[in-house]
Amino acid sequence: MQKKYSWYSLLKAGLANQDWDKAIPSSKPKSKYDVIIIGGGGHGLATAYYLAKECGITNVAVVEKGYIGGGNTGRNTTIIRSNYLRDEASSLYEHSMRLWEGLSEDLNFNVMFSQRGVYNLGHTLQDMRDIERRVNANVLNGVDAVVVDHKEIKEQIPIINTSKNVRYPIMGASFQARAGVARHDGVAWGFTRAASHLGVDIIQNCEVIDIEVEGGRVKGVKTTQGDIMADRVGCVSAGHSSVIARMAGLRLPVESHPLQAFVSEAMKPILHTVVMSNAVHGYVSQSDKGDLVIGAGIDGYNSYAQRGSAKIVEHCAAAILELFPIFSRVRMNRQWGGIVDVCPDACPVISPTKIEGLYFNCGWGTGGFKATPGSGNVFAHTIAQDKQHDLAVPFHIDRFTTGALIDEHGAAGVAH
Amino acid sequence: MFSINCPYCKESRDQNEFSPAGEAFVARPENPEALSDEEWADYVFYRTNHKGDHWEQWVHTSGCRKYFLVKRSTITHEVIEEATFAEVYSEKIS
């Protein structure tokens, strides 16, 4: 396995008939580890990476029931931003943003993080008041944000429809310049490769079928590739968190819903930034490949089916077309769904549980991708020290009992 | 996409006419004052989020606007059974 990618390795392998080493090794599970991470999505891989890199725990297994990049990590619309309203949430997402800013170098893998900015549109007076409040909160928390009016939006994005004669005219927006997108597959592969280098076993096609608990302590997991023992188990299984929790006899305050997205055929560059709208419910950016990446909302019913209703897609397409009439003849290429676990307060759970040694990182709902490095980082420290990382403290599962919820429906209200 | 047979309208209609209204059989506690914080949290926030055949509440929003129960697979979206509250609860009691 190639240790480090560099201009020299590029030249060498390029001259030698594209002789590239395998980037991701395939592992078979050992019988015992210090830590098992259930779920090989971005958050799980990042957890394993930071456990090895920052906490000195390298005897770690990531067990993934499918393949790396096959779940929500490879299904989202890749938007990264940290302009959340509440102190607790914005600190966590800003922590993540700072890690994104050095991630390609850190992982020695190009995750194509592109800080092209994000506009969150406002269409009513109340929208604009909320946007101003959120931008002020962001500035106080050291998160870059400005309020822009519709003229400035039109100057920056000439193809956007700022006409007043539409059902929901654009009045203004918040703009975060450091926000942007990244290549989601690259993020999964980069974390996998970097974690493997540090000694983490990434085990694919290995589904957890039960969690062994003895005397209130976790002992290990039963998988389709045999039993694996560990004193500490971290669950990062997104839409299937409730299923995993039930294996340990726990209930979670989350419900699973399908979230859909679709991409168009590839086109020449036409949209250089990310545009999101809570009010009409749609968000769009253009990938480096040239296709428009469009995200819709969740279906209201529970589902584990990785597909949603056509009316959600139709509703989103209508919103995007009102914002960008020029897209009306663009042909769509693919459409898909992923299963997201939604918390009642639109904030995640990063928490120990009643079972000693068993930790949950779940409930990211519709917007987990942006938090990938930050989530993994604070979860790794939480597992390593058996004590919540400072930034994770407000996200304890007990907040649903104490009532100290972190209401982020305003900033996270749109699925993204 | 799926169709639901409204037990009041007695007609199979497109899912778009209906709205989901949460997990079924989450009964409001008879004496909330007597509950511990954990029990109250469980009633308000915690759900089974079952993977498989799942009883849930739906409302015929664009039709009769009545609430009823649907047993539906959360794996395939297949609707298995529709019933009124009265039908299900009389069965439960008897």
Image (cartoon, coloured by chain):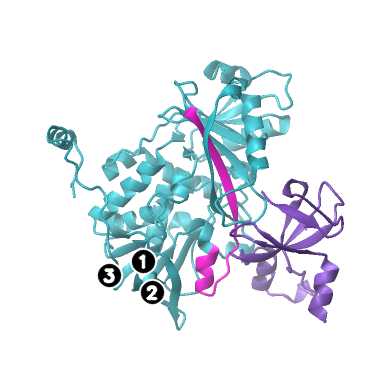
Chain colours: A cyan, B purple
The image quarter containing residue A151 is: top right
Whether residue A401 sits left or right of residue B3 in the image: it is left
Residue count near mark 3 (Cα–Cα under 10 Å), binned few <14, some 14–19, many ≥20: few
Q: Chain of mark 3?
A: A
Any magenta on residue A401?
A: no
Any magenta on residue A251?
A: yes
The image quarter containing residue A234 is: bottom left
Amino acid at the residue labelled 3? Lys
Pointers 2 and 1 in contact (C-beta within 8 Å): yes
Residue count near mark 2 (Cα–Cα under 10 Å), binned few <14, some 14–19, many ≥20: many
Q: Is residue A84 visible?
A: no
Q: Is residue A184 visible?
A: yes
Q: Is residue A164 above or below residue B60?
A: above
Point 39% across, 59% down: residue: A64
> Is disc 2 in the same subunit as disc 1?
yes
Which residue in the protein does label 3 denote? A30
- Name the disc covering residue A57, or none: none
- Name the disc covering residue A36, or none: 1
Residue count near mark 1 (Cα–Cα under 10 Å), binned few <14, some 14–19, many ≥20: many
Distance from Cα at disc 1 to Cα at disc 3 = 11 Å
Q: Which residues are magenta?
A: A242-265
Which residue in the protein does label 2 denote? A220
Distance from Cα at disc 2 to Cα at disc 1 = 8 Å
Q: Can you give x and y, in whole percent of width and height, for residue A51 in the image?
A: 32, 59
Point 42% across, 41% down: residue: A97
